[in-house]
Amino acid sequence: MGWEVFPLAIRRIVNGNHAILRSHARPVQKINDAIITLLDDMAETMYENKGVGLAAPQIGIAKRLIVVDPGEDRLIKLINPRCLEWEGETVDVEGCLSIPGIYGEVPRASRVLVEALDTRGKQLRLEAEGFLARILQHEIDHLDGILFLDRAIRLVDPEEEKKEEGS
Ligand code: NI
């Protein structure tokens, strides 16, 4: 009877004490509708929380999936992402949607080469620098149970910083 609507779902973000944030996420073996929907929900959840990136463990799912959007609606969905190359070093302030209200200066490679599958299962390589490179490293860390606080060299008062992007 009638039609059904399947709205995108905003998922609940788990907080910094949750064990899943400290576990290794499993590679995705098969890209099916459930995975596509999950990526869509992750993007929706990221935007709802005004983040620039989100990893599946942050919504309680131990799969190697991330979404990132460095701005200008440039949404990137990656399946089984991994860094192949790191180059340079840069320090900047990071936050995390799983650790609200805390910010720290984190050294990251200034340029990375990331390999992943896209939503059609096609292998892609993404060369990124600057802010996008930082977000990718932060999100891929989430897949290995690493939080930005593990790498932070100094915590900063959010009041003193204009940057408050969470990922
Ligand atoms: Ni994060």
Image (cartoon, rainbow, N blue to C red):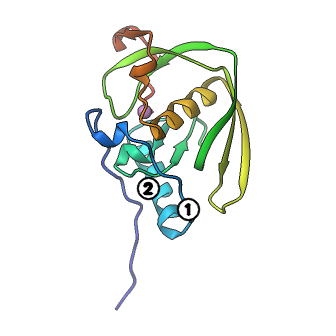
Question: With 91 as the anchor, is 118 left or right in this view?
Answer: right
Is the residue marked 2 within 8 Å of ligand 1, measured from its CB? Answer: no
Q: Residue at x 40, y 45 (%)?
A: 57
Alpha-carbon span between mark 1 and mark 2: 19 Å
Q: Determine if residue 142 is in view.
A: yes
Residue, disc 2: 41
Which image quarter holds the C terminus?
top left
Write down which quadrant ligand 1 falls in: top left
Q: How many C-alpha atoms fall within 10 Å of the one at disc 1: few (<14), some, or many (≥20)?
A: few
**Amino acid identity at mark 1:** Gln
Q: Point out the residue furthest to the left here.
A: 17
* Residue 68 higher or lower than 26, as above or below: above
Local SS, label 2: helix
Q: Point out the residue furthest to the bottom here.
A: 1
Residue, disc 1: 29
Q: Determine if residue 74 is in view.
A: no
Q: Residue at x 56, y 30 (%)?
A: 137
- Quadrant in the picture for residue 149: top left
Which image quarter holds the N terminus?
bottom left
Q: Residue at x 56, y 65 (%)?
A: 30
Local SS, label 1: loop
Q: Earlier in the sequence, mark 1 or mark 2?
A: 1
| Count of numbered circles on the image | 2
**Amino acid identity at mark 2:** Asp
x and y, in percent, of residue 8 in the image = 42, 61
x and y, in percent, of residue 165 in the image = 45, 27
